[in-house]
Image (tube, helix red, strand yellow):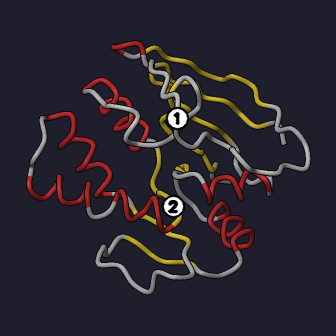
Amino acid sequence: MRKLIYAINLTIDGCFDHTKVNGDDAMLEYWTQVLREADLLIYGRITYQLMVPYWPDVAKNRTMPKAGIEFADTFDSLDKVVFSRSLASTEDKKTRIINTDLQAAIRTLKQEPGKDMLLGGVALPSQLIALGLVDEFLFVVHPVIAGEGKRLMEGIDLREKVPLTLIDSKTLQSGRVALRYKGLH
């Protein structure tokens, strides 16, 4: 069975706003390697529309240094699923839209053959965490205190705590720390 891995960048104080974290080549190289270990990216509409067409455009137009282009190429090569009731279509031929029962759809995707699946964003992952469907959590913590902005899991009502076990950690250049946890469900 394929694993569903929630992957996100955060500040030390838990802010997930992409404008509060700045990337560098080492971070892009790390995320590129993470992408290469998966074959499906899963998003809600808002995060999907932040990622696409931005990264496919970078891949097409070669508008970044080498690490950014490698990330963009890898991102663009992967199949994507976007869960949305409002998005009717997408120009990306590698993307399919699912607007049916979230829980059933994720269970079906887990049963399909393939590599692990990466889950991004906040609202959709929060729902899937509450349903007990996220197998691993990958947080890249940036060495900055945002002091403002939405925090991860803010306003999410879990029926019970979600215990996690650290399975890997890696310190990147510039002090970012990648923490990978396995859920105990």
Q: Above or below — where is 102 with respect to 42?
A: below
- In depth, the one of 164 and 20 nearer the eye is 20
Q: Which residue is mark 1?
A: 148
Q: Position of residue 151 (x, y in %)?
A: 61, 39
Disc on res. 39:
none
- In depth, the one of 152 and 113 nearer the eye is 152
Contact between marks 2 and 1 (CB within 8 A): the answer is: no
**Tally of marks:** 2
Residue beneath the point at 39% across and 17% down: 172
Q: Quadrant of residue 153?
A: top right
Q: Name the residue type under label 1.
A: Glu
Q: Above or below — where is 73 with respect to 146?
A: below
Q: CA distance from mark 2 to mark 1?
A: 24 Å
Quadrant (top left, top right, bottom left, bottom right) of the C terminus:
top right
Report helix, strand or loop for mark 1.
loop
Q: Residue furthest right?
A: 160
Q: Which residue is mark 2?
A: 43
Earlier sequence position, callout 2 versus callout 1:
2
Residue beneath the point at 45% across and 18% down: 143
Q: Name the residue type under label 2.
A: Tyr
Report helix, strand or loop for mark 2.
strand
Disc 2 versus disc 1: nearer the observer: 1
Q: Position of residue 126 (x, y in %)?
A: 68, 53
